[in-house]
Amino acid sequence: MTTPDFAQTNETHDPNIRSWVEAANDPATDFPITNLPYCAFEAEHDGHSHRHLGVVIGDHLLDVSMIAGAGALDIDNEDLIDDLHAPFWTFIAAQPP
């Protein structure tokens, strides 16, 4: 079966791409590499909990707030790095460009 041109917006929609998270390569997963939902979750650190931003990949959760704080993202925009510590993704979406 051939994917119609309109269904493949760019290379991130290619059903043949593979993830380093093995569970994301399973055709039965709800969150394959081509469908990565954003989420907010409670995380406990140093005896108190607070919200973090994340992305679900297969059966794993990538803590975006934590990797942004660790400097692991290649982003030059300090305001965006700070915003990645917001409690909800909608906070980031509501910010002016």
Image (tube, rainbow, N blue to C red):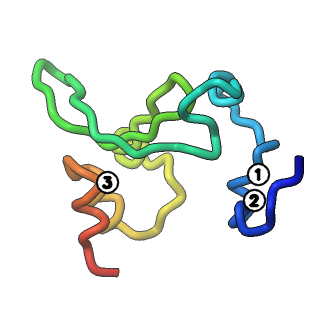
Between the residue at mark 2 and the residue at mark 3, the CA separation in whole angstroms equals: 26 Å
- Which quadrant would the C terminus be assigned to in this image? bottom left
Image spot of residue 20 (x, y percent): 69, 31
Q: What residue type is labelled 1?
A: Asp
Q: Which amino acid does label 3 sit on?
A: Leu
Check disc 1 and report the residue beneath it: 14
Dot 1: what SS? loop
Front position in the image: 52 or 33: 33
Q: How crowded is mark 3: few (under 14 residues within 10 Å), some or many (20 or more)?
A: many
Q: Residue at x 29, y 63 (%)?
A: 92
Residue 53 vertical placement versus 86 (above, below)? above
Check disc 2 and report the residue beneath it: 11
Q: Residues within 10 Å of mark 2 (few under 14, many from 20)?
A: few
Residue found at the far right of this picture: 1
Front position in the image: 22 or 74: 22
Image spot of residue 7 (x, y percent): 71, 61
Residue 26 vertical placement versus 11 (above, below)? above
Dot 3: what SS? loop
Whether label 2 touches label 1, CB < 8 Å: yes
